[in-house]
């Protein structure tokens, strides 16, 4: 793609913002990942602009903009109403704790801004000052690296990773999402200082892992993490899977199985929760390995997964969903299951988790070298669908009576005993749906209350 037809690839509303900055006398450039992506002919998302205009000036020019951080980034709405980050040229100084710069300095040259960026392919800019034909600014050979699909640190890789250890995770993540290789000196520098990742916050790690898992083959990035030692720092419980024998694909260990499973979830275009569950589903195996078996690994794994995801500060709902999937991933169906057994299975797993759990099993099957539908999965899916199409009762809310009925009709005292009676009624109705009728339930409840 030549600089001239770059103009066609940039969203018109972004060109409009650049025109407005130029008209106000400022330089304006598209920069970073969006430019890299259009050079790769990929769809660019989150457009970033850089300019010599200072934040205060940007706020004057774009009155409805937001200036929310100390790094000179102003979020502007383009004419399509989309948020665009406009960042003042800056250089970063005095990195603290291998993380963020302590001090930033605004600058007047786009080249200086590009020099603070992580990889050459992210250190390109396209645009210019007012009145000039827009062109590509490429001080570090980023364009050639895009063409060769190589990630190379800007400047000395060791220094750049010492400044901000997140760049190491970004390297493996970008290698996976872009399908790039990491240039050897850059890769070696990661291997030499992976332990610096210990200083990263859980949130920043999680954001990279989330993007990595979004790749079409996450295993590419995960293998790089293992190989460089990053995995042992950010997820030692996963690193422990290497070398654990697994009776699946010959010559492969548990870590290989995990990687195949994650890739299968990605190939099936499953969402982030299923991908995370695929990554973590066998987390309990190293701790439970005994004589070629892993008894109870799903319960141990569910706890370990939740602990890991809490460390990464994931939203509580995500943690609970992943933990749940890991806990229940070992179900074993055969055709002898009664309809009641199918209903109990649905009740235990939860209607809302069924599809994810089946998707996880399909990925796990593929990861084990067997067909996705192995273990009669299609039959179980079909039978759950039949049960779901009937008037299925799986919880207290589906019962034909409620706690108040028990109090008024049976004279039970309000309190936790009421809930216990309702739960026992649910168990009965799951097995025999025809019991879900007011008179029958009250009679059953009466005998239960007597038994106690
Ligand atoms: P994505 O496709 O995920 O958006 P990206 O490279 O655009 O990838 P962003 O987080 O959007 O990632 O960052 C935008 C740009 O800011 C990057 O392309 C890079 O130039 C620069 N950048 C981001 N994080 C860092 C970092 N930790 N160190 C140096 N430069 C960074
Ligand atoms: Mg980006």
Image: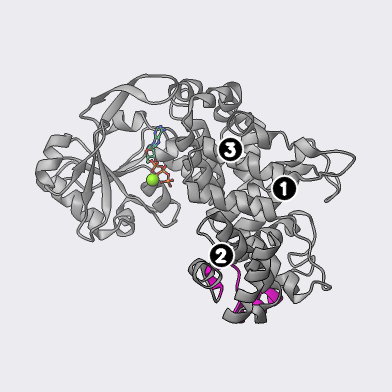
Instruction: In this rendered view, identify the residue nearer to me: 246 or 14.
Output: 246
Q: Which residue is mark 1?
A: 298
Q: Residues within 10 Å of mark 2 (few under 14, many from 20)?
A: few
SS state under label 2:
helix
| Colour basis | one colour
| Between discs 2 and 1, the one toward the N terminus | 1
Q: Quadrant of residue 339?
A: bottom right
Q: Do labels 2 and 1 touch, CB within 8 Å?
A: no
Q: Position of residue 441 (x, y in %)?
A: 62, 75
Residue plotted at (56% across, 73% down): 399
Q: Nearer the viewer, mark 3 or mark 2?
A: 2
SS state under label 1:
helix
Q: Is 200 positioned to the left or the right of 117 in the image?
A: right
Residue plotted at (13% across, 41% down): 59
Q: Position of residue 37 (x, y in %)?
A: 42, 50
Q: Which range is magenta?
A: 380-399
Q: Which residue is mark 2?
A: 352
Mark 1 and mark 3: Cα distance apart in space: 15 Å
Q: Which residue is mark 3?
A: 308
Q: Quadrant of residue 132?
A: top left
């Amino acid at each position: 793609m030549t600089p001239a037809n770059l103009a066609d690839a940039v969203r018109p509303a972004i060109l409009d913002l650049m025109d407005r900055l130029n008209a106000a006398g400022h330089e304006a450039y598209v920069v970073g990942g969006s430019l890299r992506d259009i050079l790769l002919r990929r769809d660019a998302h989150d457009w970033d602009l850089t300019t010599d205009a200072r934040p205060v000036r940007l706020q004057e020019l774009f009155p409805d903009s937001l200036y929310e951080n100390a790094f000179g980034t102003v979020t502007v709405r383009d004419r399509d109403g989309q948020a665009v980050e406009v960042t003042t040229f800056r250089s970063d100084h005095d990195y603290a704790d291998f993380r963020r710069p302590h001090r930033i300095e605004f600058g007047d040259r786009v080249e200086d801004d590009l020099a603070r960026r992580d990889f050459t392919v992210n250190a390109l800019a396209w645009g210019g000052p007012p009145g000039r034909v827009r062109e590509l600014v490429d001080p570090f050979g980023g364009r050639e690296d895009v063409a060769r699909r190589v990630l190379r640190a800007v400047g000395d890789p060791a220094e750049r990773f010492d400044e901000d250890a997140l760049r190491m995770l970004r390297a493996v993540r970008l290698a996976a999402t872009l399908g790039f290789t990491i240039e050897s000196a850059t890769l070696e520098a990661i291997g030499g200082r992976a332990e610096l990742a210990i200083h990263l916050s859980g949130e920043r790690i999680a954001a990279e892992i989330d993007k990595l898992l979004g790749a079409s083959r996450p295993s590419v990035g995960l293998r790089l993490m293992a190989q460089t030692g990053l995995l042992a720092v950010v997820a030692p419980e996963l690193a422990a899977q290497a070398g654990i024998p697994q009776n699946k694909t010959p010559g492969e260990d548990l870590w290989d199985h995990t990687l195949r499973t994650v890739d299968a979830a990605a190939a099936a275009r499953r969402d982030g929760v299923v991908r995370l569950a695929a990554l973590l589903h066998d987390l309990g195996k190293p701790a439970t390995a005994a004589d070629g078996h892993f008894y109870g690994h799903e319960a141990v794994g569910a706890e370990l997964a939740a602990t890991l995801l809490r460390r990464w500060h994931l939203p509580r709902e995500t943690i609970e969903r992943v933990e749940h999937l890991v806990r229940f991933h070992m179900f074993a169906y055969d055709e002898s299951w009664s309809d009641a057994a199918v209903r109990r299975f649905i009740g235990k797993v939860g209607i809302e988790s069924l599809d994810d759990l089946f998707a996880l099993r399909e990925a796990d099957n593929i990861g084990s070298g067997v067909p996705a539908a192995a273990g009669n999965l299609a039959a179980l899916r079909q039978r759950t669908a039949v049960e779901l199409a009937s008037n299925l009762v799986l919880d207290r809310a589906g019962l034909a009576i409620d706690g108040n009925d028990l109090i008024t009709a049976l004279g039970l005292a309000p309190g936790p005993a009421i809930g216990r009676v309702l739960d026992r009624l649910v168990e009965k109705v799951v097995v025999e749906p025809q019991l879900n009728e007011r008179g029958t339930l009250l009679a059953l409840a009466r005998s239960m209350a007597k038994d106690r």
